Image: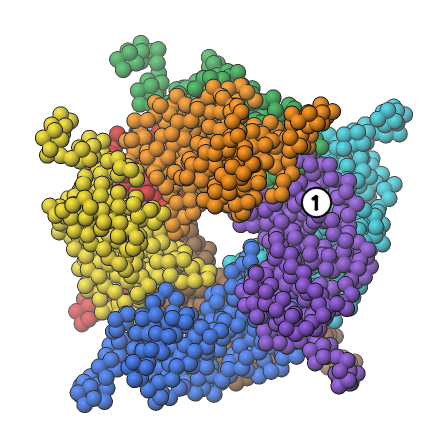
Chain colours: A cyan, B blue, C brown, D yellow, E red, F orange, G green, H purple
Amino acid sequence: MRDILEAVAAGDLTPAQAEAELRGYATGEAGRFDAAREQRSGVPEAVYGEGKTPDEVAELVATAVETTGRGIATRVDDAAVAAVRERVADEHLDATVDHRERSRVLIVRADDFEPPDLDATVGVVTGGTADAGPAGEAEAIAAAMGATVERVHDVGVASIVRLLDQVDDLRDLDVLVVAAGREGALPTVVAGLVDTPVIGLPVASGYGHGGDGEAALSGLLQSCTVLSTVNVDAGFVAGAQAGLVARAVDGSN
Amino acid sequence: MRDILEAVAAGDLTPAQAEAELRGYATGEAGRFDAAREQRSGVPEAVYGEGKTPDEVAELVATAVETTGRGIATRVDDAAVAAVRERVADEHLDATVDHRERSRVLIVRADDFEPPDLDATVGVVTGGTADAGPAGEAEAIAAAMGATVERVHDVGVASIVRLLDQVDDLRDLDVLVVAAGREGALPTVVAGLVDTPVIGLPVASGYGHGGDGEAALSGLLQSCTVLSTVNVDAGFVAGAQAGLVARAVDGSN
Amino acid sequence: MRDILEAVAAGDLTPAQAEAELRGYATGEAGRFDAAREQRSGVPEAVYGEGKTPDEVAELVATAVETTGRGIATRVDDAAVAAVRERVADEHLDATVDHRERSRVLIVRADDFEPPDLDATVGVVTGGTADAGPAGEAEAIAAAMGATVERVHDVGVASIVRLLDQVDDLRDLDVLVVAAGREGALPTVVAGLVDTPVIGLPVASGYGHGGDGEAALSGLLQSCTVLSTVNVDAGFVAGAQAGLVARAVDGSN
Amino acid sequence: MRDILEAVAAGDLTPAQAEAELRGYATGEAGRFDAAREQRSGVPEAVYGEGKTPDEVAELVATAVETTGRGIATRVDDAAVAAVRERVADEHLDATVDHRERSRVLIVRADDFEPPDLDATVGVVTGGTADAGPAGEAEAIAAAMGATVERVHDVGVASIVRLLDQVDDLRDLDVLVVAAGREGALPTVVAGLVDTPVIGLPVASGYGHGGDGEAALSGLLQSCTVLSTVNVDAGFVAGAQAGLVARAVDGSN
Amino acid sequence: MRDILEAVAAGDLTPAQAEAELRGYATGEAGRFDAAREQRSGVPEAVYGEGKTPDEVAELVATAVETTGRGIATRVDDAAVAAVRERVADEHLDATVDHRERSRVLIVRADDFEPPDLDATVGVVTGGTADAGPAGEAEAIAAAMGATVERVHDVGVASIVRLLDQVDDLRDLDVLVVAAGREGALPTVVAGLVDTPVIGLPVASGYGHGGDGEAALSGLLQSCTVLSTVNVDAGFVAGAQAGLVARAVDGSN
Amino acid sequence: MRDILEAVAAGDLTPAQAEAELRGYATGEAGRFDAAREQRSGVPEAVYGEGKTPDEVAELVATAVETTGRGIATRVDDAAVAAVRERVADEHLDATVDHRERSRVLIVRADDFEPPDLDATVGVVTGGTADAGPAGEAEAIAAAMGATVERVHDVGVASIVRLLDQVDDLRDLDVLVVAAGREGALPTVVAGLVDTPVIGLPVASGYGHGGDGEAALSGLLQSCTVLSTVNVDAGFVAGAQAGLVARAVDGSN
Amino acid sequence: MRDILEAVAAGDLTPAQAEAELRGYATGEAGRFDAAREQRSGVPEAVYGEGKTPDEVAELVATAVETTGRGIATRVDDAAVAAVRERVADEHLDATVDHRERSRVLIVRADDFEPPDLDATVGVVTGGTADAGPAGEAEAIAAAMGATVERVHDVGVASIVRLLDQVDDLRDLDVLVVAAGREGALPTVVAGLVDTPVIGLPVASGYGHGGDGEAALSGLLQSCTVLSTVNVDAGFVAGAQAGLVARAVDGSN
Amino acid sequence: MRDILEAVAAGDLTPAQAEAELRGYATGEAGRFDAAREQRSGVPEAVYGEGKTPDEVAELVATAVETTGRGIATRVDDAAVAAVRERVADEHLDATVDHRERSRVLIVRADDFEPPDLDATVGVVTGGTADAGPAGEAEAIAAAMGATVERVHDVGVASIVRLLDQVDDLRDLDVLVVAAGREGALPTVVAGLVDTPVIGLPVASGYGHGGDGEAALSGLLQSCTVLSTVNVDAGFVAGAQAGLVARAVDGSN
């Protein structure tokens, strides 16, 4: 602890970084940021944008950049993105802002941030354009954890030949996130064709009975092939779980 | 009406047959039997065995044989089958008893009964042995309505190549009943491969969340391909609906 | 394949048409369009308008027109309709735009498109004005598949005499789509009166417990007469399933 | 109060009757019996047999006979009936035991009990034999409250002509209890044909989605005609509510 | 029929009135109006305002006034009210417009309309201000059917003494509609205190689990006292059912 | 730790007691017993009997007696009770076995066990005999934690006067557990009359929609008065929560 | 009663105060205000702001201040706050307005109002910022009832060490309200560590299956530790229940 | 294919083995056995014992042994185990039968079967004895796939210190299956402490609302830490998914 305090005194550590080191989290106006999460659980802490004001998102992202070199936010709207950009400019942070509009993910990296790099591959498979949002979220997080991510899209079961053409490629990957819109049959069919672990990602498409992803979710839980699942639209969780498997494959956990 | 009464007087019609002609149903100890159902709606009246005593089943089946030449009962247990056999023997009915144990269907035909015969084919497709009961019920009813029924079994999506081998045969049929156990993906995949109408039949297999056929049912309702569905384990309804389509194809309705 | 490429070289095929022929789908900015769907499964691919931007709808409809001669979109709003009209004008497509406001269906036909024509009839039956949207969607699709469609409306069970007057007409049709609003009793009553196959179409009217079409759906699944069902408000699926039956009756599958 | 106690002293009142008069309920080994219920709310207190031991049922019925001249039990099994008969014999009660096997209702009347008699009629309407149990319970209670009860059975909507023949009779009654099995369409159709108040009684028939009476219940709640409903299989409640209406018609409340 | 046509020729009947007499319903631009409903089922046809355009509401109300002398609409918004007022003015209808803002009911009466008048009383009981909308709807309909309606409000069970003070008054009425907000205990408590038939009216207040009236509805169905229920917020149905009981009490059905 | 080991060596502590002291739990054949629970969380560890074999229950109860002087088991059947009695006899435990048949609770106390004694009162209130099981469980646990428990029974809302007579007594208690059968109105009514904290205990009585205690539970959650609740039939939890409040009142936590 | 009326005549009591004394509630334009609630049940009456107009909120709060010296409103929006402030200004009420924006609670106190003061402590514990609204509501009510409230925040189970550091402090409090967002594990973990009564407060965070607080609520009901719960987001109820326990601890009930 | 047929002719392959090689599945009396499943998808085919007769289980297990050298059955009862043992004896199979009673798993291995062996570890973590069945199933399958399995039991969150002691060991494993009984908090807490991928396994313990594992399942889906889940009691799926991750870690897929 003495070392940390001396580093602060010497200006080598900001107070925020020091607090993060000592207490495991940093305190800002918008709440406490769990700066030690990545070190402890292998998953970078991400700011869930929905239900937070633009200022709160910007505050938490800035704290993340200051304490861990990188800030990730999910489900951001345009106002939040603008607030983050403004904050980065105002505080003269040496950082780049990467906004993926379709998947609503925002990643800010300090210029000296060294991203993790794993010797492992993650596939993200979708049936159609309705899956793009959650699948993109999964892709962004798995990549942020250091995996090489391959995207295989538009292989829905309504036209199964396209999927069959991709089987050999899918078998070469280390772990798959497979999106499940409507009735959610795609992950079941994929898991019957490959020996790669499949993480199902139900997507809130569809309408009427079983809509909002409930049919897909229950289909994944009842699948006659082997797979595990996450909640509806939980792209972050699916991508991070794939990232944890990639870390295990890489031997880094 | 005069004709009918004279036929009764002459012994050419039993009173039960006469009542059925005149009122559209026949009265027995166990309730009224809708003898005109087949003529009116194209579907033979069937006795639903569950929740009825063996005597009630036997009584209703005997009334059906007397008034329409054929009696059909579904979901019968051993006691009901024995009661029907005893009744047929006791009343010296010139009839044969056909009991399909796996699908729990019982059909009694008077020796002079002329079954309908349609120039149309119905396919009944299953993924595994758990689908045998409801699928067998569907098969029995469609056949009783006069369709030629072909059974395609053990083509579950966990091993999709077997299904692909059958696609050409499936395209040649006039209408398909496709069973849907567990997550219920099979009818969706089939309907994407053929231009035959598909009637999904959810089966109450599986356990936990979405068990008892609920996941399969909601999957059929959300299917990204075109199909209609019946209730869980409603083999009779699926088979009869296929039979009605077969009648339309045959031109007999 | 050589033929196709030579046709492209000769200008007889656009590149989009060639891709559709060769790969079974065409790639545009808004995703892949399954151009072979109609040929493979008998049902024209339709663009589901909800959740897509006007530009995406216009892009996909234009691709459909280019590759198959016809583009169908469902659940379109005014902005999407405007975008499609503008696109047709901009690209000088020789095509007519048909927009059915109540059912929110949009059909664009190239001037040289020859629609299918089936020797089979589909009835679309409604109980009241609340059923107009989904019923109109069903009507549009069945007609697009080549069936002759008859609309029988305002025959709700609250005033059953009007329905009874229509029974003979209903019996003459090959297949019926019957809308089911509120408690959904209409398809059950109809199916008891005719020997035509009935496809129930639950409609999301009503409020409170069992509202949003859930009461109607469960009533269709529990019906004491023979019918199959589609999901709540799934007019496209009901109409297409009726179209598939009409194709079977016509002998074209 | 003095009068009551003097009547006890004189032997004109048993202690149980006195307690019932004074406190509104009588205490026995199996709990307190609400002896004043009929006087206060117009509905005779009935013992719900399920989940009680035969002895408890017998004890409570005997208390009811002693304090109010009549004891009613619903959902009784054979053991409970035997226990009540034994109790009546053992205690030399001057009472007759009336057991309705199908509806599982048991009514014990003291010989000097004067049943209420209302100038009002209640109709109990069923679609098929599966409705017999709850409908019989409703019939028994409405009759016990003094109404003249007419039973109209086997008029299910699958064969609607039989119902139409009964409409004039149904319009002549003061209030109707209409059973609703499977999809529960019957009360809706009846209420559209008559100007008599209809109380829907959902019955736990059916299977799969919406089974156990849930489809029927939600159909009643969403009915496009005017009616009120009770819980699934709540024959006692439906009959008693009809009895209360009959009392209002009679002018006795 | 000849009489009706001659009356039209003589100008004593409008064509709309004639059509309503002959066919039981009148056709307008916004659909068919069931003009015979009141005569057949005792309940005036009402236009359900939600999901209809102002013009449709105005059209249907005007048709009702023309054919039956009175038009009732429920769940109307301000635009619909304005459209009706304008229509009445434009067509110089000799009619008064009565709009109850809180309960969103609109009643238009032709000046020569003679409202029904029953010798029977209906009580409408509420626990708090949140019940005002549905209760007002019930009150309006019961009154329109001719009953004398008494409103007893703010007697929620959280402060039960106020209810106890009203018991004698409640016992004097012929039938009660009792609103059930939040946990819905009020109708149960009332039904234990009176011998008047109670119709429970669940109200969509509350939040979280069991919110939107579901807790109240299930509480009414499980009530340990005798009552029947209608759907959540179905004030029209509750009031009309009370009106039907009032008609039975009056002897007019 | 040395002390404990020396006490074992000296025979003052059994090995089981020593393990419990040192590790916070004791290991037996049927699993680990959380011997420190009472000390840590104020609630005695209890063995949940359902789903365990008689031997497992006996083993765990014996371990509890050895390590804490008392063993409590809930939801025990006759076989489990017999197994416990045999075990106590076989091992010559100086202990008394207290079995409450109705509430299925079993308490074994070593002869030298000194039960806790709190200066606080808990009321357990029921509406009828169906509530006896869970209410008895609550009573037993609250008493075992040292509270003085008063039982107020048969005060159901169907006959509300009996409850009103008890209000003054209820206000004198420190905390109330109020059972909620059927529609669950009783705790709401009680909480409106007293200023004592009320813990609602939903009971799995009732049938049909909202049966198995779900209506009561949702009614408690939506209550218009202030109370908290536990799960359906969770008598142990309700009693223990009341016991914790009693401890707080006593000042012993 | 004479005293009260004389006090009114003398100007010592306003008519509103007199009515509240005599009838237990005060009548205003927006409904009746239960002025005796606090005296009878220990909980101050609060105005639930959602679904009420700003004027109704202002009216009811003003009545509360006039009759009890304090007015509390929950779930108020900005318009309601403005209306209250204007009302206080307009009527020259000697009162201070306290608005807590995050928890949407508004408290108006007359200058001579003496708040209750209890010798008891309530802890309000949260896992993250998403819990702030309901937790703040609980805090405000418990404080208004006189308890000393301590807030312990940001101790979510994703980073459990922070919680462990607070255990000793939590054990010193008299009763805890513990918020439960997402999966709702926090109250279960807390209740296993302390001997203080825990009231779980599920919060409507999360998305997909089990979202809107349902997962948290069911987790609280199934907790393997002892706690009771309130409905989702029912911060008022949780805080008031904690206040009632605090009153019991203080000895003031 | 010629080779295989010659090997059959030479007696080096049984016909069953040959069919399995050629068609990917073997046909027996009880259905088709997917012999190629392990090769294709990495997971050994297992016979789901529930709903199958003892003879069907024995037949399918024997086919598995013949075609793949090993037969696995889950959820077997005593009769099925006896049938398998008898079959092995009757057919003189050189095989050992391994029956795990608690987890109801049966594994038959031919004496010359060489089990897979992975350089990867799987942890199976339970909170209490109620989790033993599904956890044992997971353990058996993961081990059968070649992983080294470590079992960590009785670390439920009600006594969290025991879990904290195991954190370092848990971090050393490659993938964890964590059982989730009752409220299902354990996997969430574990996943916050380790950087190993966690697969949640909900267990059908608990009662009342959220019972049968539904609370645990929804808690896993809402978890505030990163994990994926399988269906309730799906021990086979959880274990096989862990086995697939172990294969990826080992590099064998």
* Count of numbered marks: 1
Residue A24 in view: yes
Amino acid type, residue under disc 1 in the picture = Val
Q: Up-down: is G141 above or below C114?
A: above
Q: Residue at x 35, y 23 (%)?
A: F169
**Which of the two residues, H76 or G239, is positioned nearer the viewer here?**
H76
Which image quarter is the N terminus of chain B in? bottom left
Instruction: Left or right? Give the position of C158 relative to A187.
Output: left
Question: Is residue B76 depicted above or below D60 in this figure?
Answer: below
Q: Residue at x 18, y 44 (%)?
A: D91
Whole-percent x, y for residue D238 in the image: 28, 52
In front of the other: H97 or D63: H97
The image quadrant that residue C214 belongs to is bottom left
Q: Residue at x 46, y 21 (%)?
A: F120
At a point 56% along the width and 63% down the height, the residue shown is: H79
Q: Measured along the vertical axis of the image, is residue H29 above or below residue F136?
A: below
Measuring from the top left, give residue E11's x and y in whole percent: 20, 64
- The answer to whether C39 appears left or right of C248 in the picture is right
Residue that sits furthest to the top in the current view: G10
Q: Few, some or many C-alpha atoms within 10 Å of disc 1 (few <14, some 14-19, many ≥20)?
A: some
C195 with respect to D152 (left or right): right
Q: Is residue H136 above or below residue G97?
A: below
The image quadrant of residue F101 is top left
**Place of residue A31 in the rendered image (x, y in percent of width and height, measured from the top left):** 69, 32
- Please indicate, yes or no, whether residue G238 appears anywhere in the rendered image: no
**The residue tagged with tag 1: helix, strand or loop?**
strand
Which residue, given by chain and number where applicable, does mark 1 sit on?
H152
Give how far across and how far down residue E62 sits, in percent: 32, 56
- Along the line of sight, the residue nearer the viewer: B245 or H126: H126
Quarter the C terminus of chain B occupies: bottom left
